[in-house]
Every structure is written in C-alpha cells, then in structure tokens.
C-alpha cells in the first residue's frame, strides 16, 4: 500500500477550547515489527557509519529520557509514542473557595468574579475561557465556560469543563463530572470531547477499560479531522492487542495525524516508511517526515534524522548538518545525541575538533548510563587541567538540568 494513496479526512472542526491531549500510549504500545530506534547504540569506530542500534552492555537508567516519547530502535521493538498532553505552563490556580449562589441552574460559579479583558486576543475576538485556561486562571476559565454551557449548546465550553474536572485544575478532580461534560459535548459532535472520552476509556479512568470502545471513539473523532485521535487509532492498529494488527491501517491513520502536524505521527510514519512496514519502503519520504518531526521538537526524531543526514540515507550526506542536529538533541537531554556529538567533536567530523568539549559531552551521557570506551580513552588522554575543566563543565550541565 502506498502512503500517497492514503485517504485524507475532513478538516478539523473548529473547537477552540478543546485541550489537545494525546494519551501517553507509549507506555503500553510498541511499533511491533516496525523500525525501532533504540536509546543506546553500538559504539562505531570514528570512520564507521553512525548507528542507533542498542548495545549489549550499556543500558541507560530508566530516568534518562527527559520526557516519555518514541524511542528509535533498530530491529527490536520500536516505540513511537505520543507525548503526554502538556499541562499549561502557568501554575495551577488555588483551590476554589466556598461556592457562591448563582441565578442560573446547575452548580454555582466558583471563586471571585473578575474582569479579564487582557486574556482575550488583540481586537477582542478571542475566547475568554480558553485564554484564561492557557494562562492558568482556571477558576475564571471554569466560570466563563460554565456560563456559556448554561446559555445553550456550546461544545467548546462543555469540553473545557470536562478538561478542568478531568485534570483537577481550579476544581476538585472528578472523572464523573468530566465524563458528564464530555458526553454532552460529544453529543454535539465535538471531536475533542470524543478524543477525551476515548482516552478515559482506554485508561479505565471513570469508565470501564475497553480498548475496542476507545478505538471506536478515536475513529469517530479522527473522521472529524482530529489529529491526536488519528494517531492514537494508528497505534492501536500497530500494536494489535484487541484491535487487529494492521500496519497498513496504522500508516493510514498516522498519515492523517501527520498532516495535522502531530510530530509523533510524523515520526511513526517515517519509521514505517524507512523499514517498509505496512507501506512501500520510501527513504526519501521517510527523511522528509523525520525532518518535519525534528523541526517540531521531537527529540528522538532529531537523533534519527541526524543519523540519516550523517549517513546520507534518503538525502544527500551532510556531516555538518548532522552535527548541528545532534547538538540540538544533546541540548535537549538525549543521551544518544550527547554521545554521538561527543564522538564527532573527538574526531572533528562535521564540526571542529575539540576533545575537551567531547569529554564534557561524553561525561554527561555517561552519567545517564551511556558509556563509551573510545571516549573514555579521549578523556584519559587529556591534560589534567583540561580533564578537570571538562568534568566541572559536565557537572554544571547536569546540575542545571536537575
């Protein structure tokens, strides 16, 4: 099946308020039979091609990745996975105080009623409830959404109320109330609410755990153009626990999600294309998707794309660009990237040779469990002053990330 023939779904219905949440399926699902990108790799000689295969002796500690995500692997199981939905950067609002009576029906509005015109977008055309939510004013978001939900059929406001109850932001965590609001929104066809109900069903939070029922909800949301739902559905088809194991069907839904700039889907589809799993092998298309996921911040894709750049797989060989991409992923905390960048610095390929900096990056990767005998030798051969400087630099970096 050629990925180019994959059917596109309708554009995403405008929701505005629905918090994009991709369930962290990475903890349970794997790219069975797909290209696996491992967290560690065999140590090549300086003249060898870079690899992402997992070595037999070096195992990074479980806490090594800065965030759960898809991990490249070569032949063992690969795990492209959704990143867990990021909570708003602002600190959660204080717990609500005593409820105040309200003229409308249903629960009373919570907390002090404030004016927040600055939360709207310039020109006053934005969404006050969602603006408040994004900035961490959860009580204000709750009150505004509740007013709108009471006034009539407003699926975006209903979905936001479900998000607030489902996360415990500004109001007590209450899956029953979250599900109630999600179902009201879903009854109007809200793809965001369908996605959230699917996530809760898959996790068994407030609802009976049921993968097939979750898949049905994901499909309904995906057919309405919801990218995260399409990605989740693709993972279920790829993993094949209760759903039939169909890599081609997984690729179809990954492409739908990839078209919505879901970086995990772009990475997952790139892996399938690279290995020809469920789709016709296409290294050029794989490289383009890997590059897109890397630009969107997918660290594992950054590592794998750098390896493809260094080796000239699916694109012209470019060691300088590969070194820059390894450095970017290394700065993001990826131990493989730190090791690969250290190797390039040690031998001066794609970047000016700098053994002291190579030592610092190596020591940082080694602290995360990824050893390298060749780089150990580089460190040992440094003059004592430079070695101590590299050790101090690695310690500062590690302390800064702690």
Image (spheres, grey):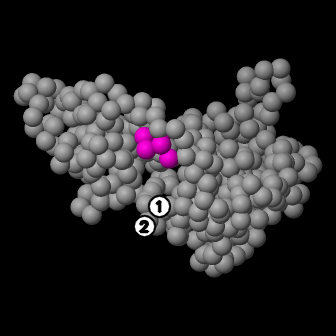
Q: Which residue reaches farthest top?
A: 123
Decide whether the magenta segment is chiefly helix, strand or loop.
helix
Residue bounds of the magenta highlight: 309-313
339 lies left or right of 190: left
In the rendered image, is residue 66 in sight?
yes
Q: How many marks?
A: 2
Residue 259 position in % (x across, y down) = 72, 47
Residue 266 position in % (x across, y down) = 62, 50
Q: Which residue reaches farthest left?
A: 384
> Residue 296 appears in which quarter of the rendering?
top right
Report the front residue among 295 and 65: 295
Q: Secondary structure at mark 1?
A: loop
Q: Are marks 2 and 1 in contact (CB under 8 Å)?
A: yes
Give me the disc on residue 21.
none
Q: Is residue 312 magenta?
A: yes
Quarter of the figure that contains the N terminus: bottom right
Which of the marked residues, 2 or 1, is nearer the chain's N terminus? 1
> Residue 374 appears in which quarter of the rendering?
top left
Report the front residue among 127 and 275: 275
Which residue is at 67% across, 57% downward?
254
Residue 234 position in % (x across, y down) = 66, 63
State whether residue 298 is above or below residue 387. below
Q: Is residue 147 magenta?
A: no
Q: Which residue is mark 2?
A: 76
Q: Which residue is mark 1?
A: 36
In the rendered image, is residue 370 in sight?
no
């Amino acid at each position: 099946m050629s990925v180019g023939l994959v059917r596109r779904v309708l554009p995403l219905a405008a929701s505005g308020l629905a918090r994009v949440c991709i369930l962290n399926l990475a903890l349970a699902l794997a790219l069975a039979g797909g290209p696996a990108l491992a967290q560690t790799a065999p140590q090549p000689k300086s003249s060898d091609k870079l690899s992402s295969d997992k070595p037999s002796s070096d195992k990074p500690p479980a806490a090594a990745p800065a965030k759960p995500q898809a991990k490249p692997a070569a032949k063992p199981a690969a795990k492209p996975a959704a990143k867990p939905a990021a909570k708003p950067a602002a600190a959660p609002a204080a717990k609500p105080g005593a409820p105040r009576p309200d003229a409308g029906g249903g629960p009373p509005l919570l907390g002090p009623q404030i004016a927040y015109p600055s939360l709207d977008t310039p020109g006053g055309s934005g969404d006050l409830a969602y603006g408040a939510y994004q900035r961490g004013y959860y009580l204000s978001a709750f009150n505004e959404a509740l007013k709108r939900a009471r006034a009539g059929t407003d699926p975006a406001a209903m979905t936001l109320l479900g998000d607030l109850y489902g996360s415990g932001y500004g109001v007590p965590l209450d899956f029953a109330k979250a599900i109630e609001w999600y179902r009201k929104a879903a009854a109007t066809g809200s793809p965001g609410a369908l996605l959230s109900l699917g996530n809760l069903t898959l996790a068994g939070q407030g609802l009976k755990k049921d993968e097939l029922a979750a898949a049905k909800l994901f499909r309904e949301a995906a057919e309405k153009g919801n990218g995260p739902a399409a990605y989740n559905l693709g993972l279920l088809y790829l993993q094949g626990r209760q759903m039939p194991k169909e890599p081609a069907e997984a690729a179809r839904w990954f492409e739908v999600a990839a078209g919505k700039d879901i970086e995990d889907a772009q990475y997952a589809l790139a892996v399938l294309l690279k290995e020809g799993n469920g789709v016709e092998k296409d290294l050029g298309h794989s490289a383009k998707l890997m590059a897109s996921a890397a630009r969107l911040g997918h660290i594992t894709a950054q590592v794998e794309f750098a390896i493809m750049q260094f080796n000239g797989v699916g694109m012209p060989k470019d060691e300088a660009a590969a070194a820059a991409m390894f450095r970017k992923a290394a700065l993001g905390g990826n131990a493989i990237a730190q090791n690969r960048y250290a190797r390039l610095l040690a031998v001066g390929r794609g970047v000016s040779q700098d053994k002291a900096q190579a030592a610092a990056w190596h020591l940082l990767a080694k602290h995360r469990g990824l050893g390298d005998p060749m780089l150990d030798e580089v460190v040992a051969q440094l003059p004592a002053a430079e070695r101590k400087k590299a050790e101090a630099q690695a310690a500062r970096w590690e302390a800064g990330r702690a």
